[in-house]
Image (cartoon, rainbow, N blue to C red):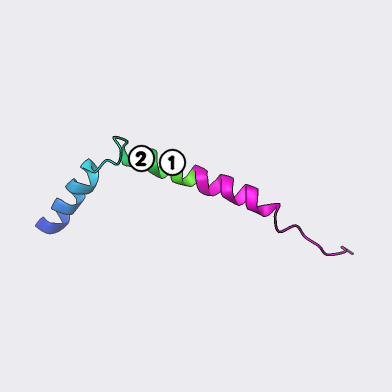
Amino acid sequence: MFLAETAANAAEHFELLGMSNKFWIVMLVLVLFIVSILTSSYNDDKTKGL
């Protein structure tokens, strides 16, 4: 269990470019959301409908 606690503590204090982990998780979700919106119009539905 000591190894798991050490890894958890290291993950808590890990920061990339001075930003916290929560910031990067939020930014990743926003980027995925925006990319999904932008790419959804690229594959436009070409069916004739009913």
Magenta part of the protein: which range? 30-50
Residue 19 appears in view: yes
Looking at the image, do the residues carrying marks 1 and 2 touch, with CB atoms under 8 Å apart?
yes
Give the left or right position of residue 33, taking residue 47 as reference: left
Categorize mark 1 by other alpha carbons within 10 Å: few (<14), some (14-19), many (20+): few
Question: In front: 22, or 41?
Answer: 41
Which label is found at residue 22? 2
Q: Which residue is mark 1?
A: 26
| Image quarter of residue 34 | top right
Q: Amino acid at mark 2?
A: Lys
Percent across and percent down for residue 12 are 23, 43
> In percent of the image, x 32 and y 42: which residue is there?
21
> In percent of the image, x 16 and y 57: which residue is there?
4
Give the left or right position of residue 31, taking residue 38 as reference: left
Percent across and percent down for residue 28 are 45, 46
Task: Pick out the residue farthest to the left.
Answer: 2
* Residue 42 inside the magenta-drawn segment: yes
| Image quarter of residue 15 | top left
- State the separation of the CA atoms marked 1 and 2: 6 Å
The quadrant the N terminus occupies is bottom left
